[in-house]
Amino acid sequence: MTMEHVTTLECTICGAEYDPDQIIYTCPEHDGVKGILEVKYDYDVIHDNFDADLDGDIRSEWKYEAFLPVHDEAERVTLNEGGTDLFDAPNLSEELGVTTLVKDDGRNPTGCFKDRASSIAVTKAKHAGRDIITCASTGNAAASLSGYAARGGLDCRIFVPGDAPTGKLAQPLVYGADVLAVEGSYDEAYDLSVEVTETYGWYNRNAAINPFQVEGKRTVGHELAEQSVVRGEVPDWVVFSMGDGCTIAGAWKGFKEFYDLDYVEDHPKMLGVQAEGAPAIHESFHGHDNIDDIAETLADSISVGRPRNTIKACRALEQSGGTSVLVSDEDILDAEVLLGSTEGIYTEPAGATPLAGVKKALAEGIIDSDETVVVNSTGFGLKDTKSAETATGGVDRIDPEISEVEQLYGTAEEAAADD
Ligand SMILES: *Cc1c(COP(=O)(O)O)cnc(C)c1O
Ligand SMILES: [Zn+2]
């Protein structure tokens, strides 16, 4: 059993340390699941073990295996997650008036960013000899975990809010998971999953409370750092949407590691974007209390009333010199169509939220027009076609007659005359 690069699990509230080989989720010194733990590493060991070239050739997140908290001998459960493209977006940049790149994580095996975490979770559950894995999810984490559980031969039982988009409810069924659609909010589904873990002892992959979860998400930061090295330019801003806050926290931790190790010469500022209807991390970052825990937004992946990783997310914003903004559901839908129609990248609402945030931050003077921005499209659009219909107004229905086409575009002669 060797994991010599992982030194300890440290409580983000009181600093107490725990053995990384123990299955412990949160620090017992605090109420409920508040005492989120953070995985600490020995970076001398990691640096010695990391012999990959930062040449931009990234087949999967396992290129950064030296940074991942798995035992040497553990069987890797992978579908080649990560290694996603960082696209130039010239049409979008022109439209926005700022140089914008798109990191397309909708191309992951199950169609979202969370595969980076699921690969680690299932690898660890399997190595720990567990055969039942569970999580609560707004949709994507469940779909993702189910796919990896199938790959790893584990049973998967997931808790999702009953009103999750149908695409996200169907996907885990195909992967063979038990899908328990809870008649309640994500927050209620979450609490139930924690209770079930305590009662039945299933391996819990909930993002915030499983300290190893967020660690796979660091690889998007590693990739962005490597892609910056290859491009010869570090972006000024990296933008993520925030639900529980683990994604932006992981991305920052990963980029910062490469920066601290001098693999990349600068670091970006992190911009976190939340929906106006689910603003808890934003409110907390800006020092407002009285946060009610209602979550109401059509961007289901970030519809979180009580984020579990507010501390880590706020730390990412603060350490990087970044900030957060709120956007409306209408802004989010507009951004979804803008990204699709300018660059051919179809993202779900939570994946379009960063772009909506960039528009807002430009308008507020947070982002300067001479800066460079990376928006992270965290989930594939086909997961939620209902939002796309709302955003676009749907299709034109016509009879199978040429005259119907002529009504739209004029006759062929008229169209030719217009050219
Ligand atoms: C989960 C998710 C997010 C937000 O991640 P958090 O860790 O909850 O902040 C953003 N986009 C998509 C597509 C997601 O599935
Ligand atoms: Zn503690």
Image (cartoon, helix red, strand yellow):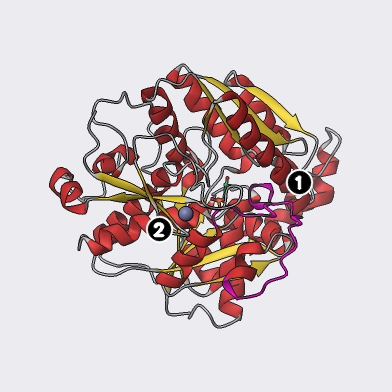
Instruction: Give the SS element for disc 2.
Output: loop
Three-letter amino acid code at disc 1?
A: Glu
Q: Foreground residue, 373 or 278?
A: 278
How would you classify the magenta stretch by its main secondary structure? Answer: loop
For residue 122, which numbered disc appears in the image? none
Q: Amino acid at mark 2?
A: Gly
Whether residue 58 is visible: yes
Query: Magenta segment: does it hold 298?
Result: yes
Q: Residue at x 52, y 41 (%)?
A: 112
Indicate which disc residue 15 carries: 2
* Residue at image mark 1: 389
Question: Looking at the picture, how far across and down is residue 349, in whole percent?
Answer: 65, 51
Q: Position of residue 304 (x, y in %)?
A: 67, 52
Q: Residues within 10 Å of mark 2 (few under 14, many from 20)?
A: few
Q: Is residue 109 shown in magenta?
A: no
Q: Which residues are magenta?
A: 285-309
Disc 1 crowd, CA 10 A, few/some/many (<14, 14-19, 20+): few
Residue at image point 27% right, 63% down:
259
Residue at mark 2 to residue at mark 1: CA–CA distance: 48 Å
Which of 181 and 375 lies nearest the eye of the viewer? 181
Q: Which residue lies most toward the bottom here?
A: 365
Secondary structure of the residue carrying tag 1 is helix
Quarter assignment of residue 146: top right
Residue 168 seen from this side: no
Q: Residue at x 38, y 26 (%)?
A: 77
**Screen quadrant of the C terminus:** bottom right
Q: Residue 365 is drawn in which quadrant?
A: bottom right
Mark nearer the viewer, 2 or 1: 2
Disc 2 residue lies near ligand 2 with CB under 8 A:
yes
Name the N-terminal-most of marks 2 and 1.
2
